[in-house]
Image (tube, helix red, strand yellow):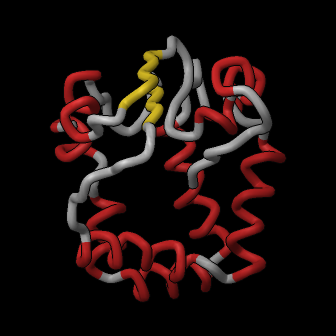
Amino acid sequence: MQAFKDNEIGYQIEQVQSPQTIGYALTDSPVGQAAWFYEKYEQWTDHDGGPDRALSRDEMLDNITLYWLTATAASSARIYWQSMCNFKEHEIKVPVGYSQFPRDIHETSRRWVQERYPTLVHYNELHKGGHFAAWEQPERHRQVHGGGVAGVRV
């Protein structure tokens, strides 16, 4: 978590402090939008040599294009502002399942998860996957969690 705070939290700070500004900038430039997303794919996917080894170029471009055509850069940034301004930890009463992937944004120990989620019924540490694990490896995700691809995070 400290490495993330030291090296990669700038995007989050920008979205917390000025979501409309970054939203307008990204909505104004398709190249800027593509660069913003591609950097996240580079940093947060579990790849060996480039994000196109985890996600196809078409998959990445489809996702970038979805944000571009719907002009949702500002609204997707605003969730950081809304979450950080109003965050309050509260008890989770439903059963919780948690999977830790090696190239996710930060690593979370089982102990940390159990302390925050006393209803933890499943904890798993996988050997492959990043922040977009279900998207990166849908077949592996189906084996572990069953069903369709759920939890694709952007």
Whether 64 is drawn above or below 140: the answer is below
Whether 107 is drawn above or below 1: the answer is above
Instruction: Quadrant for residue 57, please give it.
Output: top right
Instruction: Quadrant for residue 117, please give it.
Output: top left
Q: Indicate the position of residue 95 as horizontal and vertical percent values.
A: 44, 38
Residue at point 78%, 32% (across, down)? 147
Instruction: Quadrant for residue 15, please give it.
Output: bottom left
**In the foreground, 93 or 28:** 93
**In the foreground, 97 or 73:** 97
107 sits to left or right of 1 = right
69 sits to left or right of 38 = right
Outermost residue to the top = 127
80 sits to left or right of 24 = left
Q: Indicate the position of residue 21 as horizontal and vertical percent values.
A: 40, 86
Residue at point 76%, 66% (across, down)? 65
Residue at point 26%, 23% (across, down)? 109
Quarter of the figure with the C terminus: bottom right
Outermost residue to the right = 58
What is the count of numbered marks?
Answer: 0
Whether 36 is drawn above or below 99: the answer is below
Residue at point 36%, 61% (across, down)? 11
Q: Indicate the position of residue 32 as horizontal and vertical percent values.
A: 57, 69
Q: Indicate the position of residue 27 as horizontal and vertical percent values.
A: 61, 82
Whether 14 is drawn above or below 128: the answer is below
88 sits to left or right of 33 = left
**In the foreground, 64 or 138:** 138
Quarter of the figure with the N terminus: top left
